[in-house]
Amino acid sequence: MKFIKDFYLFNSRIATHVIFWVAYYILFGFVWVAEDGYLASFYLEFILLPTRILAVYVVIYFLLPRFLLKRKYTNFFLGYVIVLLLAGVLQRVFIHLFYENLLLNNVEKGLFSINMLVRAVVLINTTVLLVLGAKLFQLWLIEHEKNREVRQEYLEIRSNRRIHRIATDNILFVEGLGNYVNYHLRDKSKVTAYATIKDTLVLLPENFIRVHRSYIVNKDHIKSYDANTIDVENQMVPRGKSVTDEVLLT
């Protein structure tokens, strides 16, 4: 699962998270700059960042695995709303104490109002949804990779009212016969299934290539080839003119 490992920068989850939050801080420091200037904008983002980080990690490391992934949607939704409300209140307190009063010396604004709380919740929700979406995409990639690895190891082929579980390494080549295909196996047997050669290729791992309009071969079992034929474990398979040597070798 090399691709999933490379999903983290430098193969480090901590480094990835640190770089993400630093980039987030710098980006939104510029985005939310107003008449108070860059200093005030970056100072405000610095004050708000811990609350948003806390809300994000509660959602992706507590609510997500305990409720959402287990399809306990009601519990997840209630927990999500509670997290947003608490984070919104905490964020509003930080803004009032450390930004409005301390930096701007503006004591006229009250601590709470509906509009202020809604604004805080919306901003936190945007951040949480951004990271949650990225986390769900990562989990999907991991699951997809696992399924692909399982698919590469075995195929379940329906033939003669039975399901044949065949290791892909035991398949030498596949022969297309219109709406049927023959799986030729290492023990010289074959399994016939109702499928097209095109649909069959999709089910097979990357070491299987289509070398003719009616044939797919397992490159791991190629012994030799010439311009017209390919020797797959002493069985000759026709080779299409468009199939290059590089395709057979790589």
Image (spheres, rainbow, N blue to C red):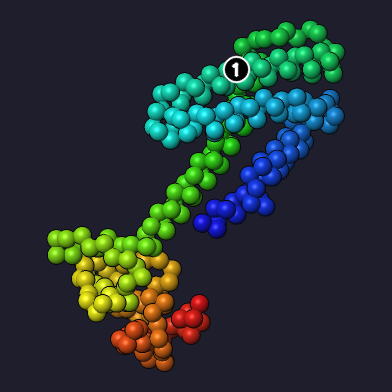
Q: Give the total number of marks visible in the rendering.
A: 1
Query: Based on the displayed image, in which of its 4 quarters is residue 234 positioned?
Result: bottom left
The residue under the point 80% across, 30% down is: 42
Is 41 placed above or below 201 here?
A: above
Picture residue at 42% right of the left edge, 92% below the top: 226
- Crowd rating for badge 1 (residues with CA inside 10 Å; few <14, some 14–19, many 20+): some
Task: Report whether residue 177 is seen.
Answer: no
Judging depth in this view, the residue of 118 and 84 nearest the camera is 84
Name which residue lies at 33% across and 62% down: 154
Q: In the image, is residue 191 above or below residue 58?
A: below
Q: Is residue 228 left or right of residue 49?
A: left
Residue 78's x, y, as percent?
Answer: 47, 20
Is residue 135 found left or right of 238 in the rendered image?
A: right
Give residue 188's position: percent from left, percent from top.
24, 79
Q: Residue at x 47, y 34 (%)?
A: 65
Horizontal side of residue 217 vs 96, given as left or right:
left
Most extreme residue toward the left, as rendered?
A: 161
The residue singled out by tag 1 in the image is 86
Could you say where residue 109 lies in the image, as x and y percent from the top left? 75, 9
Q: Position of residue 138 (x, y in %)?
A: 52, 46
**Mark 1 residue type:** Leu
| Residue 197 vertical placement versus 42 (above, below) | below
